[in-house]
Each structure stands twice: as structure tokens, then as C-alpha cells.
Amino acid sequence: MAEKKPTGTVLVAGAGISGIKAAIELAEIGYKVLLTDASPQIGGILAKLDNQFPTDHCGMCRMLPMVGREYASQYCMRKGLYHENIEILPFTELKSVEGDAGNYTVELLKKARYIDTDKCNGLGECIRVCPVETADEFNHGLTLRKAVYKPVPHSTPQMLLIDMETCTRCGECVKVCPTNVINLSAEDEALTRQVHAIVLASGVKLYNLKDFEDAKSWAVSPDVVSSLAFERIISGSGTFDGTIRRPSDGRPAKKIAWVQCMGSRNRRQKRDYCSSICCMFALKEAVLAKEKGGDEVETTIFYMDMRTFGKDFYRYYERAVDEHGVKLIRCRVQGVMLNPDKSLSMRYFDSETQEFFVSDYHMVVLSTGQVPYETHQKLADLLHVDVDSRKLLPTDPYDKVKLVKPGVFLCGSLMGLTDISEAVGSGIAAAGQVSRFLSGLDVSLLEEEEIPEPTAKDRDEPLVSVVLCKCSEKMQESSVDFNALGAGLKRLNGVGEVHILDMLCSDEGKQTVLDLLAKSKCNRLLMGACHPFMYRKSLKNLAKKAGFAASLVEITDLSSIVHRGFFDPQPVESGKRDYTRLAYNDLRGHIENLKLKPALHVESLSINPAALVVGGGIAGMHAALSLAQRGVEVHLVEKTDRLGGYAGTRIEHTIDGLTPVSMAKDLAGKVLEHKHITLHKNCEIVATQGSLGAFETKIRDVSKEENFYLTHGAAIIATGGHEGATDEYEYGNSDQILTQAELKDGLATGEIDVGEAETIVMIQCVGSRQKEGREYCSRICCIGAIANALAIREKNPEARIFILYRDVMTYGFTEQYYTQARLAGIIFVSYSLDNKPKVELVDGSPVITFTEPVLNAEMQLTPDYLILSTGVDAEASNREVGKAFGLPVNEDGFFVEADSKWRPVEFLKVGLYVAGVAHSPMTLKDAILQAEAAAHKTYAYLSGRKIHTAHTISRVHDAICVRCQRCVTICPYGARSYDEALDRIIVDGATCQACGMCAVECQNNAAEIMGFSDKQIMAVIDAGLSKDPVAATPD
Amino acid sequence: MDFSQSDKDLWKQIYHTKDLLHCFNCSTCLSGCPASHGDPPLLVRNLARMVVYGLEEDLLNDDTPWACVSCSRCEEMCPMDVKPFEMILAIRRWQTSNDETRVPTAIVEIYKRGYTQSVGTNTELRASLGLPELQTITKMPEMLKLYQEMLMKTPVVSENDYMFNEE
Amino acid sequence: MSEFEPKIVGFFCNWCTFTAADLAGTSRLSYPHNIKIIRMMCSGMVDPKYVIKAFLNGADGVLIGGCWPGDCHYINGNLKARRRVAMLTEILKEYGIDEKRFWLRWIAASEGTMLREVVNDMTAKLKELGPSPLNREALGEKSEKAKMIG
Amino acid sequence: MANFTKLSFKKGELNQKLADLFKGMMEKGVVDALLAPMIQPKRGVMLTLVTDPSHLGALDPFAPVVPVNGARIASSITAKPSGRKTAMVLRSCEIRALVELCKLKQANLDDVLLIGMDCLGRYENLDFVKLRAEGQSSEAFLEKALAGNTESGGCDVSGACKICEFPVPDNVDLRLCAIGTGAEAVYLESLTPKGDKALEAAGLNTGETPAGREAAVQQLVKKRKEACDAALAQYRESTPSIDALEDRVANCINCYNCRVACPVCYCKECVFVTDTFRHNGDQYMGWADTFGTLKMPTDTIFYHLTRMSHMSLFCVGCGQCTSACPNSIDLMPMFRAAAQKTQGRFDYQAGRSHDEKQPLTVFENDELVEVTGQVK
């Protein structure tokens, strides 16, 4: 029999959110993932942020898998992550990478933590006795920590480690640790692993006050903090206790200023790039400061260009200014001075009044950006590749996540500091590229664990086996009398056996449990253990081996009750508080719950392996090819008779050297002759119904005037967009006034001759970023305008070119094109929304008058050409496609994704995905990245793997259902529907997340969550409040 | 500000370097400039803009470049490395080369008290920060006399001595 | 007789409040022991029946812990919980179960200290209020009323 | 201008006049069937579905009795629509309950010509049969009731009716007006285009508005409101605690008949009879251990409080729960008091309008901030 193919193994180096997302996506389709991170705990920057723009909420847990959710952790991501196919190695550095395409040998250095985190139950005695105190990096030195410490406050299990620089090796902690997991002489451990692909997700170093020369002039007081430190100041687990306190003396900070572009847009320090996200997080922090600090907090931001280019970012900017009173001052301040009364004063210049102002602040927050070069150079050396001309890792011109070296990919802030939705989107895209790469190699997926047939034991009378861990004999006076507890529990009806062991975490402990369970006649198991076992499922897998159904095993945290006796703040006068009763009630609640819990089984979903892609633009074609390459049958529906979409038919080349038209041509070529893709031109979507794995879509062929049906398992919406229309600034009344696209075409065909032109004026944000027009930034017009201006400069070195702008949106590394334009003598003049330039026609040609902001003087120009940047409009047909699929479309006409940050390419309904300009205006590279991500999400279900529902989902007891459909309207995921023909409520097992809202809305429990029934919870309430005595005398 | 006669190549005469074109008028150079406290204030950013626009008339008779105390703080802090201090000197050179009668009145200040700005006045601020008293030349009459004789030997002072002998 | 210790039943959402409870529990800022925590997948999963049963079983107070609006793992479970609490409070008030005994609070994952404060605050307020009229145990064994409320 | 049609009748011929009206409607195909209270062959008056007009002789809509709240009957007829146009003669509480049931997709009024009747109260079923046996006619009751006295022969109308603020039905196509219309005449008022079409088709032309009607209705509603406030205040003062509630429902035997009679308790099977409340033996023993004794059947107070939390938002105060209780526990004030509070909290009124969304089915992001009292 052919030797078994090795399981596809992928190294994900870096466990910030994009690394975690890439790891989850790969683990979900069945690859083995090795997730490493240099810092002691995973989570990256996000572990420090409580609320993130543009929603000002957290919601990180919405990143967890939906259908295969029971393979992963089902709790707050800041506590940590667990997935059966992911091996997580925190505090581990990537030392070397050898080999090439498809089989790499990587050397990892697992740095010593001196604490075995698999057994540490987070009692915290070691922290209590540790004499050393030092600054806590997590809170940027605002708080103190011990030598033995928790790197992230919320992680559970606690992932403690010892900081050997400050540890005095006094050994107190070793003495007091009940499960003796501390080993002061542990060594770093070198590991070598064979992997088939690598995803780099290490993020980049952030500019900060300590390590950068040019920042020193700002470090005049502890009240000048970096933006990340400010996040800790307003966080519940940081120093926020109801008031925002300034670090120097703890007095409330009522006047706070933000200074933008700290460390970025600085040619002098060789950092001529923009860090993309600082404007948005400065606005967010200003809004939060007001909400948390109270109305009397005044917030001011000193900026150059307010770069809020993402989806719904402009509305956030408007709300910050209009509703939250954030004051914006367009002036880059030279420095901050410390006043005798510890306040900080800054002097700035107001162009309108041409006067200087000095104002004092309690706190100054520096919006610190990225410093990527060092990280990129280190990784480049590791991979034996050379950095590109911009001193960054050399990536594929069209695929931001693909390195030129085969089998190596990157995502997240390695592509340049990204916001959350891009980090998560790039994580999925990287996973997609890895899966495409591995599908070419001779590697297999992890064999899905076969679904255990329900054994006879499941249906017997419920009999519970209870296994309790005393934690350790070292605990002389434990606060729980285990004999009385054991006796009390044994007397309960339905309890088959009670075993009390100590040190369950030790190897012998595990072995004794295995032996006990093997001969047990019980069919339900309750274990009283501690956090590592609750949150890591190692014992659950152990119980499964001993024949217990996974859904009938419950592990509860007994150790925190056992240990609470130690630090009980108010011991009741009548001697010891009755912890035995506390443990008894808690365990009894779980026992009653288990007795009433039915054995749950998964149902496998029949998945139609075909995919539907709506829209034949570059994003649509890219997604179709990405799926077809992996053997998925794809139906590509295009409403016109040509492939390529707007970019593919009208943009010859872009400023960063891409050639969309020729690229679209060869993509179209591949699509037409690919055997797995069927193209349907001149077709429009009429209606769709069904759910993941079983969609049926009615399509109308406009040219043949006939309808036909397509059945498919999932769908990707890639309907794209086009240049915005306008009638402002006398457009249409003179042939000297054109839009950017008309200029681009005219220059390409030579129709427009700028050779003799003397003056050219461009106006940005025409009809965009304003209440009555498009209330969003179209993100690509500034870069497009600069490209056209440079093209004109090439043809006419003498002409005077003006670009009138509100904020130049050359975010990220495109800032270099803004500099290049200024070097070419293009003059940028800013205008504000309430003082727009005026255009009137004087005998047929445009005359523009506007205020020159720097010199505060009136200026008038009569240009040969006036070019208007009119932004990007969504396809009008989005509304019909949205109605057909039952998908929401926002007021700007773009599709509303499931979650703007955590599920950017998905819809709430599982099985429907979005990519490209259908989501929001974006550059070609971002559209291709989203297409790759959407393709991967689709492939996850159509890869031919067996997909089954989770154990715990909602079920309808049809006999007592009165079809009032209240459960259908209440379901946040649209996972329920009323089937007219069958006259029944249908639950879509894949989408249902068992949130239980339908069960509460349904008053007679016709809708019920299996495993969380009313009967069970009411039994737990009874147990919790029961008064009956625990066995007074141990028999 | 009359933009009609602005000469778009003026910057090549005044300050012919690519550095100037890097400026995106972020006004970092303004807020820390000591001479910006004067009246009229020296606004380095505005001068750079006038050079880029090529407003010859306004630049010619603008005295503010002469108020610069050459502390080079603007150069230290300019993010786009426009080297504004070099530009100020370039504007001064261009102004005098175009009109040799242009002798800045500030030169009288230098003759009389050794500085263009009145330096020794902020005594209390210096005291509050624990700094020593400033020894200015006006407090040492004999040194001042020697200094003035030395200046009288230079052509720009001797040829315009009408400006210097106090009545 | 030992000083009255109010019994609170806490329905904590698995995602935010339960994390804060872990944070409060393990980071040694332990809160009083008179709270019986029941882990629900979402505050939107707490059925009014459970709150009524808790009070009839003699609980002195019921605390539902949910995520801040916008943080909910299930998009808007917390908003639904808020409406149900508003409705149920009206009914319980009719029968002498004071509004101060039935709390809904948003407690984010990072707000371990906030959770401790909420539980301590609620315990203090319940001590002022005294035992719930349905807390038959507090009335002592022998009183004729000391029978289970059916 | 509301359009009324006067239907004058000689003494003793009210029912005949109405019968002719409906006969005309059915024969002219305005409607295919009629659901209205009819005198039953044996005894008593019950809602009857009539498809052959010749049987209309026994019509008696103004009979002061509502054995079963008509909403339940209308819902069962229209939940799976027959497609045939039906006229239904119902009172205000029945119509308001029907509006709620429509929102819950338990009824469908597309093919229904809804005819509401002024209502001056209903006797309990047995009282009505006794009074009817003693010869009291509907018209006699109407006359006395309009004069303000509903008591006769030692019996009086149900407590719920005495405090009902909605004697006049809304959300109807046609309205049978008896209040403030003077003797020997009732008026048929049309309120919707469907009503106008029906009147036209039945060959009735609109006349002038009955003079004293508006004032009479206002006055009656005012009287009823005062009575209602007094009754609810009296109830709240008598039952301020669970202990008092236990006393009030002391002889409740968990037969759940009040649920069966309640028009807005629309579940097929109440949760209290499903498996959720079929407890195991050891649970009963556990509860008994707590205090040594356990009253059986259990979950009595639990049932009433839970029913309040389920249906108080839809309660229209029809009083059928009190009428249905075999142990004559006066449940009506209990549910009306709860309904007043819960509906008041969301300023929702059961049965007021078809488009008013039921409170627990809609949710806003920044509403009811006072519930948690937390500002970020």
C-alpha cells in the first residue's frame, strides 16, 4: 500500500491577529499548523486594545470558526486560543530556515519560561511571595509586576514566566508552588521541524520614545505617552479606574492632545512612508477619552492629512468632530515644553488667522507609527533573499501576501501597518495562497476523526462518574474536606462512582484516571480539575479514548474553590467559610446538568461542491481561477458580454507598475479554457434560496431572454464598481473640464494633447466625503490623480500643475508617490469643505478662484484643463443582487459584510462571501487579496472534505411548534427559515451558532438548544441554591 | 499677493535644490522658530511657499528673512529635510544681489548691542529655570567700543556710516 | 445569628463577563463567595423563567452579566437581554421583588475590577435591603412559612 | 366625515333587522360566510359559522355573553386561509386579541370583513343561560345597560367588562354602534374602503351621524377608566407580594385552563405541560428535603409569573381567565396589572395597531440605557 502521504504542515511565524487568523483558516481545512510567537503570550497588539475603530468595540471572538467551531476554543480570544490542529508555541523565535519550495527545515528556539504552563493552575502564590518588583511592559511601565509574572492579564491558563534579568533566584516561589511546576534552572530548547509552507506574520516594530533619537526631544515628561500606552491608560485591565489619570502624578487628565505622524512621513530619518492607521486610532482614542473621561475632557489632534480612507472611516471622522467635539488643527508641532506646574504646552500656527497660539495640556499622546525596515531585513536574511528597492521583503507585484520565494507567504503588518480588517483579510488570503500551494504538493490533510457511532451506553440511564483532583498533598490545610464532599456526592441519585486523586496533572495521575475510566460503567463524566484542563481539552480527549461521548464529559474548575480559602478577604466570623458546601453545590449543579443532558451527535452536511462567482471583473476572475485550480467546479456569471470589469477594461497601467488591462486579458484567457469554469455572459441574478452546501440560484440570460437554474454550495459576490458621476464645477459645460478617467483615456489615445498646456488644475474629493454627496472616501483618487499629473509632467515639463485637495490619501508606502509628485513641481493646495474652490466659465473656459491656505491669499487660475476626481460609485445592480441573495446593501450601495473588522469578506449567512469593490472602493492589489480570501473561505467548505454541524445546535420540536416565526426573526445569523411548502421551521445546521436566542423567544421550547435546555439550567439553579447539608459525618 | 506675474522658475535663481520641492508646508519649522515671536514674525513656511510660487515682488522687499537668529532649529526638525535655514540665507543672498542698496536695518542693532534681538530681557524666566545671568556686550562698554571699531573697518558699515554714528 | 449574607445567582455570558470573572477570580481580586455563577453562552440566552425560578428558590439577588453593546459574539444578544430584563423587572416589582435585586450589567472581558465592584456593590445593597421575602431559609427553619414556594 | 347608516327597528326586532342585513350581504355575494353569535338549539349563545343565509334566524349578536373569546375561533379559521370571504361580528377585546394573533402569524385578515360591535359587558356563561331562561332578551339588557345598569336577577357582567376602557372596537371595517344612538336604532359605521364597498354592495346608503354618540362614548370610557384604575389599585394594595399572591391562588390546581381560555396564549402546548416540567422523582425528593414538606402540584406561582412574562405584553383584558378558572380564582386583575406595567414600559398597547411591532421582537443599540445605568 503506497507509503502514507505526509500531513501538510504549515509554520505561521507570529501570533498577532493576522497570524492567528491564518492559523485558524488553515487548521479549519485540515492542515497541521505550528503557530509561534516571540513574545510570551499570543495576541500581539490586540491583547492590549479593549475597543477598536471603526466600531469602538472589541468582538475579537467573532474571528473564531463558525461551522467547525467545536474544534476550537469557545471563549474570549484574549484568554487564549485552542484548536485541535494548531500547536501553539509562544516565547519561541524562528532561528533559521533551510530547504526550498515545499519542504523547509526550520530551527526554532523555545526560550525558557522556567514554569511548565501545562500544569500551572494560576493560583498565584509564587507572585505573592516574589520579592522583586519591576516595570510591567504590558502596561508600558505604567504599572509594576513581579519577576514571576503574567505577560497578558486576561490569559487563562495564565502562561506565567520568570524574567531572569530581574529574578534574584531566592527560590521562595519554588517552595510555595502546590504543583511544583517551577524550575529555575530550565534551559532554552532548540527545536527543528519539517514544514511545507511558511506564513510570516510577525508584524513590525513600532516607533517609540526609548529607542529613537529624534523622539528624545519629545520625552520631556512621563505625561508624554505613546498611543499604545494611552490604550493601557483607558483600559479596564490597565490603569483606568473610572478616570483617565496622567502617569506623572495620577491627577485626572482633562485636556489631552494627539500629535500625528510621529516617526512617519519623515524623509530626514529615512522613513518617507505613512503608517496608514494612526489617524484612525488617534480619532478613536480621542472619542474614547471623552466617553470614558467625561464631557469636560477636551481633545485636540495636530495633523497634516486626516487619512480616514477605509470603509465607514469618513463617517467615523465626521462623528468624532461633530458629536464628540474632537478639535482638529492642521499644523505639525515642533515640540512640547514642560511648564513648572507639570502641564505640557505646545505652540502652533493657525493659517487662517496667520497667528501663533500656545495651549497647555495635561497629557500629550504621540501617534507612533511603524518602523519596518529592521524586521524586513532580519526576515530577508533568514530566508536568504534580498529586500527590494523599498528595503522591504520582495513580494509578487499583484499578490501582496505572496513572497517571490515559493512556499513563503506573509500577512498582517508585514505588508505595512494595517488596520484590523486588512490584517484579518490578509490572514485569510495568506491561508488561501498556502492551500493553493500545498494542493500542488503531494501532501494530505489531517484525516478527519470519524464521527463515533452512538454507543449503547449513551442511551442507558444517566450514570455520572465523578473524578476530583485534590491538587496536591502539599496543601496541608486545604479549605475543602474532600471526604465529606466525596461522601455527599456519592449519595446523590444518578452518581455511579466518586474518585478523589491528587496531582491529576502528573503522568501517574493521568494514567490512574485512564484505568479508572476504562472499567467505569458510567456514561457521563464530571472532572473537578483546574484551568489548564478546562481550557485545553487534553483530559476531554483522554475521556473520549476511554469511550465517553464528547458531549457527556464536563470539566469544571475545582482548584479555584479549593484555593479560595487562602485569600478569602472577609472570612465569616463563624470560623472557616464552608468551602466544602461551595464545592458541593458547584459540582452538584454540573452533575444535575449532565444527568439531564442528551448525548449529542453531529449531522454531516451534504455539500454541493460547485461554487458561484457573481461578477467577471479581475476580483471575480481571480477568485474563480483560485478555486478552479483546486478542482472546484465554478460558475462565473457576468452581467455584460465582456470579462475584465472596470479596471480590466479601462486602466492600462497604474502608478506602481501594474497593467490591469493586459492582466485581465490573460486572466480571461485562462478562465475561458479552464475545464472547471463555466462562464455565463449577459446573465443577471434573479433569486436565490437555500443555505451552505445547497443553494439554488435563478439566473436570467438577458441576450437569450431565458431563465435557468444553477445549484451550488457557496457564492462569491464580486460585482465591482465604476468611476463616480458628477455635475459639480461646471462639468459637462466645457470640453476643457474632464474626469480623471477621461483624462487617462485621452492621454493614452493621444486625443488630449497636453504638450502646449500652460496650467492644469485638478480638484480632489468632487462629490466625495460630504454629507449630501458620497459620504465616504473612495481611497484611490489621490493616487490616480498623482499618476495622471506625473504623466502630464512627462509630456510637458513646463506646465504648472496644481492639485486642490482636502486630505492627500497616499497612505502606507504610496506616500513615496506624493513626494515624487512634489519633486516634479506639482503644487498641492489644500481647501476645506466650507471653503470650496469656485469655478465659473468665462467665454467657454473654466476660471478657478480659491484661497491659498499657506499664504491666506485669494488665487485665480485659468487652466487649459480642469480635471475632477469624482471617486468610485457602487454598481447600481448591487441592490437587485442583494435582494436576490437576501444580503444587506448600505446607503452608499456597497454590500454590508458580516463584521467590518473580524469577518471582512463574509456575510452573516454562512456560505456567501464578498470580494473587491463590491465591499468598498479599494486598490487593485487589495481587490485581489480579498478575492483570494473569499476563494479560500469558499474552498474551506467545497474542498470535498466531510463537513458536519457542531454537536450543540438548535432543534425544532415540530409537534409543538405553532409556526409563529418569532424564532426566525430573532436569529442574528438568519439560520432559520419558514418553509412554505413543508409548513415547517428549517434550521440551517451550518450557520446556527447555538446562541440560544431562539430558545428564549420560543415560549414553549419548541425551539431548543441541544445541551443547553431549560430543564438542565433550572436543575443547575436548584443545585446552586440548595440548602441540604453535605454529609455531616464522613461514613 | 498678486499671482499673475508669478515666475514659476524663480526658485531656480533663489534656492536651486530639490530639497525645497519636498516641502509639504507642515509648519513644523514655524512653531519652534524664535524669530516667529517678532513683529512682523519670520514665517519660514510662508517664505518657502512664496519661493515655490515665484512671487518675486513680495520676496524682494520682505525683511523677515533678516530676523532669523540662525539657531537652525527649523533644520533640525524639518521632516522633509528642506534645510529651511539654507533657504533663508539663500533668500538673503538673492535679495542683496538684486539690490545692493538693501542693507537690513537690523545691522544697526548688531552694531549697537551685538545681537539682532534684545537678548538679556528674559531674566525672571532664566532665574526660574535656575540659569545664570546673561553677560551681554552692552554691559561691557570698553569691549563694545573695540567691537564697534572693528565693525567700522568692514565695507558694509563704513560705506553706510550715516546709519551708525549716533547724534 | 451570623450576619445575613445575601445569596446572588449570577448568569454570566461565556465570552465577556465569564472572562472578567476568571480575571477577577484568578488575579486574586476575589469577590465574595455568595455569588453562584452560571455560565450561559450569551446574556441573550437568559430566559425570564430562570430569573423567576432563582427568586422563587430564595435567591436574594440575580445579576446578569453581558457584553457591552457591540461586543456581543452573537451580534446583538445583549440588546435582546436588555429588553427582557426591562419587561421582567416590571412584573417582579409588582410582587415586592425590588428592582435593586435584579441587575443587568455590561462587563467587558478586561473589566475584572469592574466585576468585583459590581458584585461587592450588589452584596452591600442587598445587605441593606435584607433577605428577599422569598428567602425562607433566612426566616428560620420553624416558621410556618418555611415551605418551598411551589 | 365618518359615514353611518341608520338601522332603525321596532321593539323586539333588532335581531331580525340584523339578520336581514347579513342575509342581504351573503345573497349579494359581499361575503360567502358569516361568523356571529347565534342562539344554539339546546341553550346559550355561541359563535357560529353560517354559509347558508336561510339559517340566520337565530342571530343574536348583542346577547351579553362571550363563552369563548372570538379571536381564538377567528385564528383557527384564518390561520390556513380558506380563500372564502367571511364577515365576522366580534367585540372589542376579541378584535384586539385578533390583531395580536395576526402579528404572531396565527391569523390572517385578508379575506375577512371585520364587523366590530359596541360592547357593554358580558355575563358569565351560566348566569347568562339562567337570565335567558328567565326571559331577559338582548334588547332588554341593551336598554338597561345603556342606562348604566348591567345588574339584573342577582347577576352582573364580568369584572373585566366593568373596567374595560375599550367599549368601542377599532381596526374594523364596519362598526355596529349601539352607544348613544337613541332607542330603536343601531348604526352601521364604515371605517375602511373594504367597509364602504360592502355597504354599497349591500345597497345601504350613508346617512347622518348619530348625535349624542361621541359624548356618550367619552362618558362611558371615562367611567370605565376610573373603575379600572380603582380596581387595579385595589388589586395592587391587596396583593403586593408573592406571599399575598400565594394566598390569592391558594386553590389553584395547575389545570392550566386559564391558559386554554386566554386568546393570546397561542402556544400549541404550554411549556408547563411539556417535558421541561415533567420532573424526575429525585428532583421532587430534593425539593421536599429542603424544608421537609412540598406542596403538590409544584410550579404554581412559577406558572402564573411565567405566564405573565410570556403574554402580559399581548393581554387585552378580556377576563376569560377568570371565567375559565374552575376554582373561581379572580385572575383577571393579576394579568391586567402586569400588562399595564409591562406594556407601559415600552408604551405599547396590545391590539392598538397592526404595524406596531411587539416589544420583544425589536431591539435598538442605544435604548433603555437606564436598565444598566452604565455610561461607557
Image (cartoon, rainbow, N blue to C red):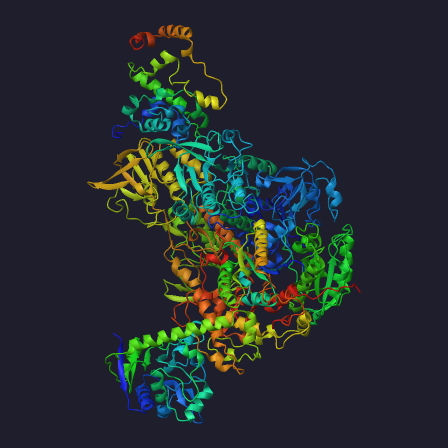
Q: Is residue A441 visible?
A: no
Q: Nearer the viewer, residue A719 or A590?
A: A590
- Of the 4 image quadrants, the one containing the N terminus of chain A is bottom right
Q: Nearer the viewer, residue A793 or B110?
A: B110
Q: Position of residue A342 (x, y in %)?
A: 49, 32
User: From the image, which quarter does the C terminus of chain A lie in?
Assistant: bottom right
Residue placed furthest toward the right: A1035
Q: Position of residue A129 (x, y in %)?
A: 70, 42
In the rendered structure, the answer to whether residue D77 lies left or right of residue A195 reads: left
Q: Nearer the viewer, residue B140 or A7?
A: B140
Viewer-proximal residue among A137 and A871: A137
Image x and y of residue A959, in percent: 55, 76
Left or right? Give the position of B79 relative to A196.
left
Query: Which picture quadrant has residue A765?
Result: top left
At x 77%, y 50%, the residue is: A474
Q: Residue furthest left?
A: A843
Q: Quadrant of residue D151?
A: bottom left
